[in-house]
Image: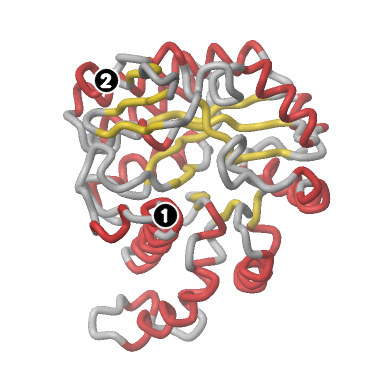
Amino acid sequence: MSGIATARIIDLHAHAVLEETLGAAGRFGPEIGIDAQDVPWYRVGDYKLIGVRYRGSPFMDPEVRLARMGAAGIDFQMLSPNPLTYFHYIPATEAIAFCRRHNNALASLVNRYPDQFAGAAALPMQDPVAAADELKRAVRELGLWAGYVGTDTTRPLDHPDFDILYQACVALDVPLFLHPAPAGVDGPKGDPNLLRYDLNIVAGFAGQETIAIASLIFGGVLERHPALDICISNAGGAIPVLAARLAQAGQLRPWAPDHTRKPEAFRNSLRRLWFDAHTAEPRALDLLAELVGRDRLVYGTNFAGWDQPAVDELSTLGVELAPNARRLLRKAH
């Protein structure tokens, strides 16, 4: 634990692509290659990501990652699944096989670099019982520190079927991280308007995060599991600007549950969640901090992604939020 205990900057939004997982989901892949024009591609099912070179990059090469972390001043990262490989909509058999191989490979990687990396487990959400079982295996046998799943699954996040997973998180005393994936990778295609201008990622992710938070609060997940810690990516999407409207709906709309009808009830529930601080708008982060408190924010970069913050933006916020990461990951002294 010495690595995270002394780390000045802890990054909890850092995805990894693992060589050992290629082909682990059978016909769904993943598969990686380069075309005749030397353009790299990465295939998941019928979805093909063109132009992102994973091999030799920080996503796949830990030494390249460490060099980039050093240049950015990041001391420690929790590595998480690639959002393209959540596989929440494929048959459960293939999803379970993929998650097991992914988590085995991730544990092997982080165990080689215990002072720089920890890992979060991929979980087969289409089978909640299997997801809970895999989380138990990943934590107890492999030494991973959290669960990590997509915001879009075969069931809403407040569905009672997921209570077995939430109970497992509490029993194991580990957090659960939620992060979106592009609609249509292996599930429903979503709004076709989001296929233009990368809106699937730029705007669609924010929508998924906001819906996830609303589902958790309105659906009573936090009421049923008062000791559960869930962390949402990208400063909660549109939550900083929509929280007041959601709170109003939770008080006044006919469907509003009893637990959100009291004044301040929605905001009190919001303060139960955690949020990674990765956002391009500092004012949105300030508004989120005003809503939930800076003690519920952790640092995240989407490391090596297209929207990773510039190096000169890292140090102050990263240092400030490091103690929060230690608390969320149960590594505080």
Inspect the image, locate mark 2, and give the three-letter code of the amino acid beneath it. Answer: Ala
Residue 281, x across and y down, in percent: 63, 64
| Contact, mark 2 vs mark 1 (Cβ under 8 Å) | no
Q: Secondary structure at mark 1?
A: helix
Q: CA distance from mark 2 to mark 1?
A: 24 Å
Residue 264, x across and y down, in percent: 51, 81
The number of discs equals: 2
Which residue is rendered at x = 22% and y = 37% of the image?
Answer: 89
Inspect the image, locate mark 1, and give the three-letter code of the amino acid beneath it. Answer: Phe
Which residue is rendered at x = 36% and y = 82% of the image?
Answer: 249
Which residue is rendered at x = 77% and y = 43% of the image?
Answer: 311
Residue under pointer 2 = 25
Q: Quadrant of the N terminus?
A: top right
2 left or right, relative to 325: right
Residue 173, x across and y down, in percent: 53, 38
Q: Nearer the viewer, residue 302 or 2?
A: 302
Q: Quadrant of the C terminus?
A: top right
Residue under pointer 1 = 205
Q: Secondary structure at mark 2?
A: loop
Which residue is rendered at x = 49% and y = 81% of the image?
Answer: 244
Residue 9: image quadrant is top right
Residue 272, x across and y down, in percent: 54, 61
